[in-house]
Image (spheres, grey):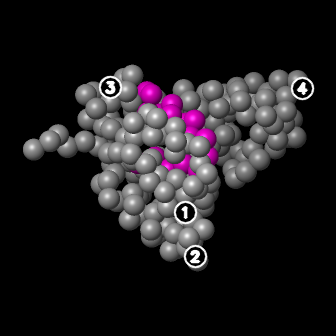
Amino acid sequence: MGREYKNIVILISGSGSNMAALARAAEREDWAGTVGARIAAVISNRADSTGLALARELGLPTALVPHKDYDSREAFDAALMAAIDAHSPALVVLAGFMRILTPGFVAHYAGRLVNIHPSLLPAFTGLNTHQRAIDAGCKVAGATVHHVTADLDHGPILAQAVVPVLPGDTADTLAARVLSQEHRIYPQAVRELLDTL
């Protein structure tokens, strides 16, 4: 009988840079040995997600559940839940997963669903966070790791990182500065959460 692991399922839509940061931290810090956790699968809703290829390069199992194959948000979420639940997840980690999830999906994973958002929540929920922070004259910006609830980007905060907004910043330069901090705090927050499961 093999060891029972706390399985982590990571959901992505794009490049998978936060997924890769999590995978590298899990390997570097031996999450399997230290907290009995492993990344069981990386699932994307987009066939063109470069993160899927990156996950395979990192030796992680991958799956594709294209949202365009379903005629409703509920039907997609049901298919996605089936793909996730096949791995008996202790934790479902959103890493650049660009779909708004139904209340039923969120309730199904209550307490086990986390996200990273590129702003200092509760400020700038939703999209275009970096440009909105610049337009508002913010002196600092950052990223937030939080539990997911039915309210978009409003769940209990697990970790935050702050970066300066510099004179002459564009949305892209600010995004790059924030992303480097996302790659630092997301693995830390997930690792700390695994200790509590």
Callout 2, which amino acid? Ser
**On the picture, is 96 further left or further right than 87?**
right
Q: Secondary structure at mark 4?
A: loop
Is the C terminus in the top left, top right, bottom left or bottom right quadrant? top left
Q: Secondary structure at mark 2?
A: loop
Provide the residue designation for mark 3: 30
The x and y percentages for residue 55 are: 47, 40
Stretch of the chain drawn in magenta: 8-25
Q: Nearer the viewer, residue 44 or 138?
A: 44
Provide the residue designation for mark 1: 66
CA separation in Å, label 2 and label 3 = 40 Å
Residue in the image at 89% along x and 26% along y: 168
Look at the image and tell me whether residue 148 can be seen. Answer: no
| Residue contact between numbered discs 1 and 4, judged by CB atoms under 8 Å | no
Residue in the image at 70% along x and 52% along y: 126
Magenta-span inclusion, residue 23: yes
User: Which quarter of the figure has residue 177?
Assistant: top right
Q: Secondary structure at mark 3?
A: loop
Mark carried by residue 72: 2
Check disc 1: other Cα within 10 Å, few if <14, some if 14-19, many if 20+: some
Mark carried by residue 168: 4
Check disc 3: other Cα within 10 Å, few if <14, some if 14-19, many if 20+: some
| Residue contact between numbered discs 2 and 1, judged by CB atoms under 8 Å | no
Callout 3, which amino acid? Asp
145 vs 67: above or below: above
Q: Earlier in the sequence, mark 2 or mark 3?
A: 3
Residue in the image at 73% along x and 34% along y: 175
Residue in the image at 26% along x and 35% along y: 36
